[in-house]
Amino acid sequence: MVAPAGIIRCVRPEDFFSHPDPDPLDDFGIASSPKFDLKLVRELRSGPIQRADDVEAAVALARLLHDDLEAFGTSGGEQLTDPQMREGLLALRSALTRLGLDHFEVPFRDFRTFKRYWLTTDGYGSWQARRDILDQIFEPMHDALAERESAALSSTLADAGKSEGAHGMASSRRGNRRAEASLHSGKDAAGLPKRWERLRDRS
């Protein structure tokens, strides 16, 4: 079931990977690595995923893709393949569009086109220059998503407060009705006849 609007379900970058349980071991006794969950990513591309709303999913996916592109452009050790990065960027673009944040665009499609991009934008021979290129693209996106996330959380908390207030008012009205009914029935709030209350007072 898709998460209701305004409901925050925390998503982490690592949630876009499937983790075998228990982790199978290869021939050398080493646990297999988590696999990028293409099914989940393609689900996000087509619409909101079941476990979270778009803003939470976009926050986590944007961070994952940013970090992996930075790894590719600097020390290496990226987790995704070129086709997986392409799928991830397409899903992120779709989520941003649904959130009305489609003005944030990543000017490359995958690792290969990212390298071509940095070679034409002063990124040649400098890891820091490549980090700066990615920061210029992703940091405003992270900030906008963080604002949406905060607004959604505030709205959720406000709705919860209204619900609690309505419950309290309903309880108060029920109490008033019971008290009013006791006056008409000749019984006290505990349900005892008034005459027993008077006899009790005399003793």
Image (cartoon, rainbow, N blue to C red):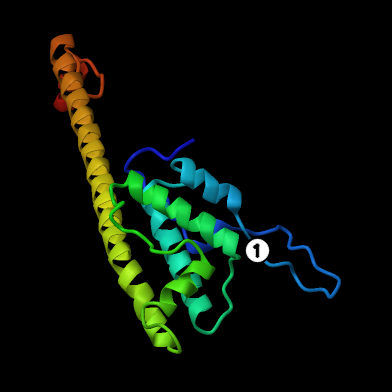
> Looking at the image, which residue is at 46% across and 51% down?
91
* Numbered-mark total: 1
On screen, residue 66 above or below 4: below
Q: Nearer the viewer, residue 69 or 143?
A: 69
> Looking at the image, which residue is at 43% across and 64% down?
108
Left or right relative to 194: residue 153 = right
> Looking at the image, which residue is at 27% across and 42% down?
160
Give x and y (percent) for residue 185. Answer: 18, 10
> Looking at the image, which residue is at 68% across and 67% down?
33
Quadrant of residue 186 within the rendered picture: top left
Give x and y (percent) for residue 13. Answer: 49, 62
Q: Read off the residue under disc 1.
A: 34
Going by the numbered disc 1, the residue's amino acid type is Pro
Give x and y (percent) for residue 9. Answer: 42, 50
On screen, residue 173 above or below 4: above
On screen, residue 55 above or below 110: above
Quadrant of residue 84 within the rendered picture: bottom right
